[in-house]
Image (tube, rainbow, N blue to C red):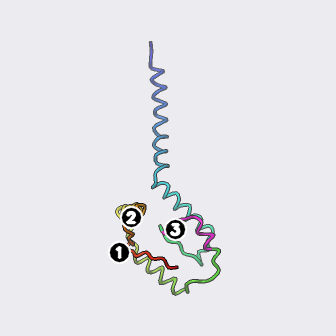
């Protein structure tokens, strides 16, 4: 009996299932979800916020609803010189984008999930969280 048609069908099914399994693994990974989420936030900010009035920073925003919140604010909180100062402080504290910087960022985010770990600011100092109410 010739088994070659059965072997060919089995191999073609396996060769089809392997890429599907790999793509499913990629799509379900936290890194991919974070990347897609950040792209959505950047796109929404680019399309819905006026570039002359708002500045967006990489890896700062945690939620996509921030645009409607920003647009709902009618009162100026900072003067233009204060805004320039804040932007320069943020830019001066940024690290060079690299794989090592990305890994450190991921490590910090994962440690924030652990309720037992101390809260650290990006410069490594222990943050004293107080209720401002």
Earlier sequence position, callout 1 versus callout 3: 3
Q: Which residue in the structure is indicated by mark 3?
A: 61
Quadrant of the image occupied by residue 7: top left
Label 1 – label 2 distance at C-alpha? 13 Å
At x 36%, y 73%, the residue is 126
Q: Quadrant of residue 96?
A: bottom left
Q: Which residues are magenta?
A: 60-70
For the residue pair 107 and 127, the one nearer the viewer reads as: 127
User: What residue is at 47 percent from the left and 67 percent from the top?
Assistant: 59
Residue at the disc numbered 1: 125
Q: How far apart are the alpha carbons under marks 2 and 3? A: 16 Å
Give above or below for 2 relative to 78: above
User: Circle 3: is it few (<14), some (14-19), or many (20+) Cα within 10 Å?
Assistant: few
The answer to which of marks 1 and 2 sits earlier in the sequence is 2
Q: Residue 93: where, in percent of width, then height?
A: 40, 76
Q: Secondary structure at mark 2?
A: helix
Earlier-in-chain disc, 2 versus 3: 3
Q: Position of residue 21 (x, y in %)?
A: 47, 40
Q: What residue is shown at x 40% (from left), y 61% (from top)?
A: 114
Q: Is residue 69 above or below residue 114?
A: below
Query: Image check: 46 left or right of 117?
Result: right
Q: Nearer the viewer, residue 109 or 94?
A: 109
Disc 2: which residue: 108
């Amino acid at each position: 009996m010739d088994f070659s048609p059965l072997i060919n069908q089995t191999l073609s099914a396996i060769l089809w299932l392997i890429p599907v399994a790999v793509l499913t693994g990629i799509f379900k990974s936290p890194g991919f979800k974070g990347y897609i989420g950040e792209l959505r936030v950047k796109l929404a900010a680019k399309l819905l916020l006026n570039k002359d009035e708002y500045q967006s920073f990489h890896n700062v925003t945690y939620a996509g609803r921030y645009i409607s919140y920003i647009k709902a604010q009618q009162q100026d909180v900072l003067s233009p010189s204060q805004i320039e100062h804040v932007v320069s402080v943020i830019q001066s504290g940024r690290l060079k984008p690299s794989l090592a910087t990305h890994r450190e960022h991921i490590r910090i985010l994962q440690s924030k999930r652990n309720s037992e770990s101390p809260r650290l600011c990006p410069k490594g100092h222990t943050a004293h969280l107080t209720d401002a109410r």
